[in-house]
Image (cartoon, helix red, strand yellow):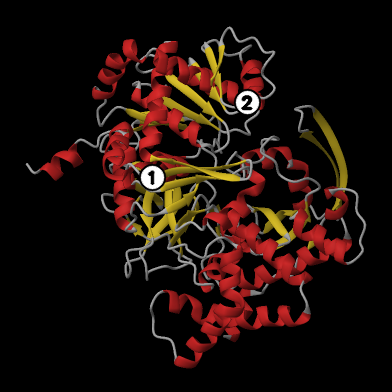
Amino acid sequence: MTGTQNQVDDLISIPALLARNVRDFGDQDAFREKEFGIWQSWTWSEVAEEIEAMALGLAGLGLAKGDHVAIIGRNRPKLYWAMVAAEKCGAIPVPLYQDAVAEEMAYVLEHCGARFVICGDQEQVDKVIECQEKVSSVEHVVYYDPRGLRKYDHSKMTSLEGMMASGRAAEASLRADLKAREAALTYDDTCVMLYTSGTTGRPKGVVLSNRNIIEASKASSEFDSLTHDEQILAYLPMAWVGDFIFSVGQSFWNGFCVNCPERAMTMYENLHEIGPTYFFAPPRYFEERITILTIRMEDAGRLKRNMFKYFMAHAREVGPDILDGKPVGGWDRFKYWLGNICVYGPLRSRAGMSHVRVAYTAGEAIGPEIFDFWRSLGINLKQLYGQTEASVFITNQPDSEVRSDTVGVPIPGVEIKIGDNGEVYYRSPGTFVEYYKNPESTASTKDPEGWVATGDAGFIEESSGHLRIIDRAKDVAKLSTGQMFAPKYVENKLKFYPNILEAVVIGAGRDHCCAMVNIDLTAVGNWAERNNIAYGSYQELAAHPQVYQTVQEHIEEVNRSVAQDEMLNGCQIHRFLVLHKQLDADDGELTRTMKVRRAVINDKFGDLVDALYDGSKEIYTETEVTYEDGRKGKITATLEIRDAAVQPVGQRMAAE
């Protein structure tokens, strides 16, 4: 066996990858963080020293093999290192969503039995203290930012720096034990436990092994030819599997640099400063950027607006073909080159994507109009399909085979098949070990041969081998007319419009579809300001007659588009209302990854659903809301319900 093969065989844990990176890329930047306006950097050698001190400190506090360590906070290098330090000790890191309320946090802490919690700041410490009334397992809290914590009871609380200092001081007595623990790590030991978003019930703890994370990181990196020279921005929730794969799995596999923004509100600015080469964002990010861009264009002078419209129309025609290396005429290429100087280049720069070589979106289906818009700018935006249970990756789109209506082909090592009911199944080296303390759910999701039920409905194109996802299997249904109902397909088309932030389409088992819409307060508020329309709240603006008219125009335009799809033309929206409140994760209407909880919404807004179908022109409603400080309250409103024009499909098709 060759020396190279030995080195590869030794890469069976994240700490092993760290040791390799110190050896091969020791002086190369591994992590950066902007703090107090200054970018600070750590090389792989420096990162290894910090992680070693953390691991020694945790061992000194009594962390045992197999213990769970909860980690809560925003994206910061030392919180990522804490996850690796926990694994170095033979323990299991469990990142939590930093915006989770105390009740959600208590469930996860109690379920995993976390003995130690590492918090980013006082806000997270306070939530853990509140949780301790219900959680019996937590023995010690470690905090990173000491501000506001000086007068707290420190008998079971330690600063991260203090813990690391203690670890270094006790290195002589702890090193041998720590070295033995690290040496004992195997490919099948747990690397991380991540909780699902809980769209249909309580979140489930997904156990992912070193094999799962490393094999998925290796295969996906080879698919897109990632190297140690990549730059990424770590801004997504640390508790989300995508962030763990990109910022830990792929970063440690390839040895590239992870950049952490100063704060959530400076993310766009920091993205522009870093200019990542490899970028990931959920569809909502790209929707929000289009909203911001649209607002700016509306505020621009006539010459700039006309230039934008002219060149963007040309970009939509030829941009994707140029990006994919397809033949395009000389004159069209010249116009695109000119548009690149005047419009596309500045837009890419403003979006922080001037250096992006590969960009991905996933998590939910992205609207084709939104997807095509970004590709027309020359950004190599692609779709991947995955889930927490797959260590993210199931399918990716190869370069030059990128389309808005598919999610690509299986990455190396992944097999997919379609069940008799249209559900997508897969198996791969990244397939999760189990749901923690939930053998029933594990057995119902993964069969003895390793095939995992995704819960999504789709089909594989015979001509290309690409997978097409229709919708969540549980959401795909039939109208009472027998036509297919796939709400996400229509919702994504609606969310292309900057004025619409969220939409929920209803229709399963009924003779037609209706919709409830959330307006985008930024976009619509900007419109109101430019037109001297005063408003005092979201509720007041959402009820404005001109807002309703605009939403109606968007819905009717979407209806014209949906009518052209022979499979889903029954999903046109007949009636709609604009919701009086924004859907909120704190109110249980969205998950922490911003996915709609349809069952909750159908139950909570049952009176609105009934009114949409009984012919009412308006409906009075009372809704419970959660304020920022956790208090509950009620808001009331009388909502207008409007009819929307639908396309007579039969007549249209006959005319064609």
Against 124, residue 624 (above or below) is below
The 10 Å Cα crowd at callout 2, few under 14, some 14 to 19, many 20 or more, is many
Against 501, residue 608 (above or below) is above
Viewer-side residue, 217 vs 493? 217
Viewer-side residue, 640 vs 49? 49
Which mark, by number, is residue 546? none
Q: Residue at x 51, y 69 (%)?
A: 375
Against 569, residue 634 (above or below) is above
Quadrant containing the N terminus in the rendered view? top left
* Circle 1 residue: 251
Q: Is residue 618 left or right of residue 555?
A: right
Q: Residue at x 83, y 31 (%)?
A: 633
The 10 Å Cα crowd at callout 1, few under 14, some 14 to 19, many 20 or more, is many
Counting residues from the start of the chain, the first of labels 1 and 2 encountered is 2
Which mark, by number, is residue 124? 2
Q: CA distance from mark 1 to mark 2?
A: 26 Å
Quadrant containing the C terminus in the rendered view? bottom right
